[in-house]
Amino acid sequence: MRSRTPDRACVEAVELARAAAEEAARPGTVGEHVGAVAEGDRVVTHLFACEEPGYRGWRWAVTVARASRAKTVTVDESVLLPGPDAMLAPQWVPWSERLRPGDLGPGDLLPTEADDLRLEPGYSGEDAPPPDSAVSEEMEQLAAVEEADVTAGPPAAQDLPPVRGSIADIAQQLGMGRARVLSRYGLHLAAERWEEAYGPRTAMAQAAPASCLTCGFLVPVAGSLRQAFGVCANEFSPADGRVVSLAYGCGGHSEAAVMPRPPQPPPPVIDETVIEPMVLHPERTGGSVEPGVPEEELGYS
């Protein structure tokens, strides 16, 4: 096994390495010598600090070597490399992964890849029609088509509608006339995204008096997502017009708020709405007032 002990002659060739770095770098940008690393037998890399603005933490790496039984040290290469504390540009990310919800604006086109996992082919028309079918000729022509072509552009540039009675026409009437539909993976991603935004784990749902499953403002959706999601139609709800989980809830639940009854005040201690007669001369009436006695006899003024 070869030793990794740095070669003495290569380690001492600091000025040779500096001269090579200064030749490759701009004048005055090669800083102090920060170390030497043994790369192999009689091969050493010298590191110099880089003083170039915008390259903080970078180092000039100059590799020198000495041939076997030779006394002369030569330069192999010089390159600028980032150090452990170097300031680096963020890692490049493809545009398809940089997109975020809301980035698509008017006039922007977002093409989907042919092998997009979120989509799968719609109807294929691969089944051969019965020989005695009335539309067997048209069905046979469509059965040879493996996949519908999707043409980019406005509706005027699209193909004409399918012939009446063909497989494409029937599929279109049944809602299956699209070239591609959501796959199970695409449905799963959408369900996770919607449930994260308007699901049972949100703070609004945790404080809600009831779930959307029993709310009259919930508009159910079609398809397999009907079992778990709907659209909120309450204009005062924070989820108005959004797809919400059936386990979501808010304070705008249709059955949560009951109009309170008007408060009933307690009976008054002194009833000021009733007139109580007072006798001016109780000794004349014996302390009581007989009903029907005129006010003049009671001594009222």
Image (tube, rainbow, N blue to C red):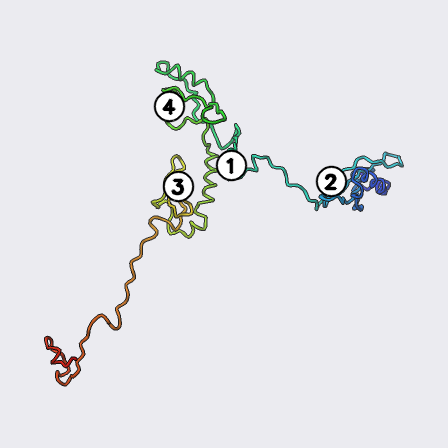
In whole angstroms, how far apart are the C-alphas of marks 2 and 4? 64 Å
N-terminal-most mark, 1 or 4:
1
N-terminal-most mark, 1 or 3:
1
N-terminal-most mark, 2 or 4:
2
Residue bearing the label numbered 3: 231
In whole angstroms, how far apart are the C-alphas of marks 3 and 2? 55 Å
113 left or right of 92? left
Q: Which mark is residue 105?
A: 1
N-terminal-most mark, 3 or 2:
2
In whole angstroms, how far apart are the C-alphas of marks 2 and 1? 40 Å
In whole angstroms, how far apart are the C-alphas of marks 3 and 4? 29 Å
Q: Nearer the viewer, mark 3 or mark 2?
A: 3
Secondary-structure class at tag 2: strand
Q: Which mark is residue 170?
A: 4
The spot of residue 12 in percent (x, y) is 86, 43
Q: Which mark is residue 81?
A: 2
